[in-house]
Structures are given as C-alpha cells and as structure tokens.
Image (spheres, grey):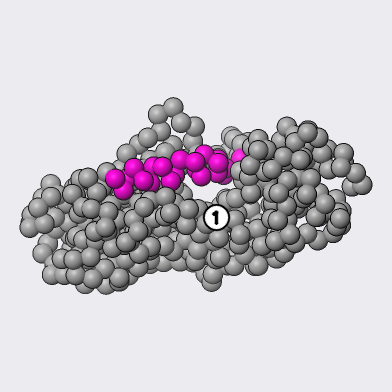
Amino acid sequence: MDPSDPLDTRILSVGTALPGPAVDNAALARRFGMDPLWEQWVDAFIGTRTRHLAVDIDTGRIRCSLADLAEQAGRSALESAGVAPADIDLVVMGTSTPDQLMPATVNVVADRLGIDQVPSFQLQSGCSGAVQALDVARQMLLTGRHRTALVLGGDVVARFYDLRARLASLPPSQLVNYVLFGDGAGAAVLTTAPAPDAVRLRAVHTRLVGLGREPGAVLEWFGPVDRHSERAPAAEDYKAIEQHVPVLAAEVVDTLLDELGWEREQVDHLLPPQLSGRMTQRIVRHLNLPGAAEVSCVDETGNNGNGLSFFQLERALAKLGPGGRAIGIAIESSKWIKSGFALERD
Amino acid sequence: MNTIDDFVTLLRDELGLPLGAEDIGRSFDQVEGWDSVHLLHLLTALEHATGRRISLPDALEAPSLEHLYAVAVGR
C-alpha cells in the first residue's frame, strides 16, 4: 500500500489489563503441593517466570471477568488516544473464553464503555485472535465506511484452572496448561484519520492452515447435559505445537516481507509468537531476523491468548522510532491459523 | 523401587510409553516419544517411589534412562 494513501490505518494507542499480582512458579508449586524439582523444571523447560490469574489461587475466589479486563484495557486505550466513546464507530473483539456464550462479551464491554449504535463483532479465536480482530477492523476501516475502531482481545481461563487438580497425576497434555497460561486483555484504537507520527498498520495476514491437521489445542465447554463428561476440559498437543509453530511463523515472516517489499535487515523489531519463554526463544532463532530486537512479554504475563499481541504492541509502540519497522506473529494451534502484521512509524 | 526391572515397570505404568528393558540404555533422542514433560513425570514418580529428592541439574546430566535411574537411587 502507498504510505500516502489516506485510507491507511494507524494505531493511535494500546491499553492492557492484567488481573491480580504476578503468580510465580514457587507460588504455583506451593499451591499445588509440587516440590522444588517441579519448579526447577518449569524454569528450565517452560521458561515462563510469572503469570496473572483472574482466580486468587489461595482462596479460589474469582477476582474478575473477561469483560472487566477488556473494559479496563479498552478504557485505557481510549484515554491514551484521546478518543471519546462516541467517536468509536466499530468494535471488534477476539477471545477463546467469552464470559458467556450469549451475550457476546464484546457487547458487554461496549456497553460499559458507553459505545452504542455501531457494528460490533466477536471472533471465537485462539492465539491468532488479536491479529484476526485487527484484520477485520482494518479491512472495514479501509472500506471508508468506518473511521475509528476499538479492537479488543483477551482471555480468562479461570474456569479451567482447577485448584483441586493433582498436577503430579495429570497427563502431560493437561499438565502444561497450568504453567503456560495466564489471564489478561488488551485493546487498540485504530483510525484512518490523519495522525502525525503515528504507527501505521501496514499489513495484516491471517490464514487457516488446518486442512487435515488434528487440533493442537482444545478447550471444551459444557452444559447441563454433558457437564459430567469425561472429556478433558483443556488439552494441548504440545509436540505438534513445538513442531509446527516455528515453521508457520517463518512462513508468515516471508509472506509479510514479500507483500511489503521489505528486506529482512529492515525489520527493527520482532514480536514473535508467545507460547512460553523457552518456546519463544526457539522460534526467534528459527526466524532469522538478526537485526530485529525481540519484543516479548510471555515470561511475565503468561500466555493470555487473544491478549498477547496487544501486550507486545504496547511495548513495541514505545520502542519504535521514526521510520521504525516491526513484524508481529501469532500462531493459533487449535485448528491451526497462522497470522502476522507489520508496523511502520512515520 | 529396588531393581532396574522395577524402574522399567514404573516407566510403562507411569508414563504410558511402550518402553522395554532394551530402551533404557539408549540416549534420550533415540527413545520413541520421549520429551521434557515425560522427564518431569518420571522424575516426580521416581521421587515418590524412592522417597529421595532428585536434583534437576543432575537429572539433566543423565544421557539415558539407565543413568537417570542411577541418579534417582543415588548410585
């Protein structure tokens, strides 16, 4: 796209919200009765030092909902952008863990923020959800029918976080969830209005690549008829994830570079997939962008799914100088979606 | 757990991996299906079975299941 195109989309601001204090691996080990060996293993192989949880692991009390976190992130983004709720004419949200199946959480959040009489969409999405939401918002803004969008994403896994679980006897596919994931939400204000020195969202790419592939991650939901089902509420095929994510992430980088005509050396910052501290390190090595500074958050925030890209975006906006370029990547392992976006500051 | 045979039984029962006595001398990258989560599972089971604490750095030095057994029983 021609940078002078008046319908280019710009990111005015990003806001994020995390519940409660950071929960470190020692606190998890204490809560679940795991020994120092387990804690050392998490440090060595997962590499996620802390996460934030909507559930208080000492009391079991649920502190907040996804709507609470998304409202906080959205309000923060609006205030940072200096945009009033009445100026938002499009809302898009991504989540894999809506508070309820109906009403959609996006509409609860819009109501709390005072946003009304606008199109609103919620994507049922995993780790690529933030990028998918950015894509939907950007495409709708580029039609010219809308001018300023609030894009939201987040997850709250509290109802899957069984504090009575005996981690020592859980199968590996369920065990990893207790150390990988956290809760959080983010938001961004996008506009096609002129904004000096803003960061442009130059390209967004999302592709379903799930043909013939088994899901790499599954989150179940239950109703009164099947609530006692034996199905695992949450499971990860972490081996498939380790195998496929680095490859898919590299494909996304190549696609974005081709689309924009950028050379690898021209990328200043890389926002890589945030599976866990260790996995992200491995992926970064695989991506071969030696000149790009890594912008990651997962070792502090935990993997909060649809929120992650916003936490990285928030950090990246603070780092990108004039003319700075960044590429962000997210890979959804549920039914396999690869996605990415490119940023450039004027 | 007193013998290497007990160890092989524990491997099968706790990890669900189709391992036999012939596998325990192999290096880990040659053990079908082996990964870091299995390592955690096994070490936790070994601590339970032996009543001894295992140091992860020591366990990571072990090149095979056989050596891991030696670490676990303190030999």
Residue A208's place in the image compared with A6, above or below, is: above
Q: Which residue is mark 1?
A: A180
Residue A255's place in the image compared with A58, above or below, is: above
Q: Chain of mark 1?
A: A
Quadrant holding the C terminus of chain A:
bottom left
**First to last magenta residue range:** A232-254
What kind of residue is marked 1?
A: Leu
Residue drawn where x is 41% and y is 33% of the image: A210
Q: Is residue A243 magenta?
A: yes
Q: Within the image, what quadrant is residue A125 found in?
A: top left
| A272 left or right, relative to A179 | left
Q: Is residue A238 magenta?
A: yes
Residue A28's place in the image compared with B2, above or below, is: below
Of B35 and B67, which appears nearest the observer? B67
| A186 left or right, relative to B10 | left
Of A60 and A283, which appears nearest the observer? A283
Within 10 Å of disc 1 (Cα), the crowding (few <14, some 14-19, many 20+) is many
Residue drawn where x is 30% and y is 43% of the image: A206
Percent position (x, y) of residue A266? 24, 59
Percent position (x, y) of residue A322? 19, 70
Residue A4 visible in the current orientation:
yes
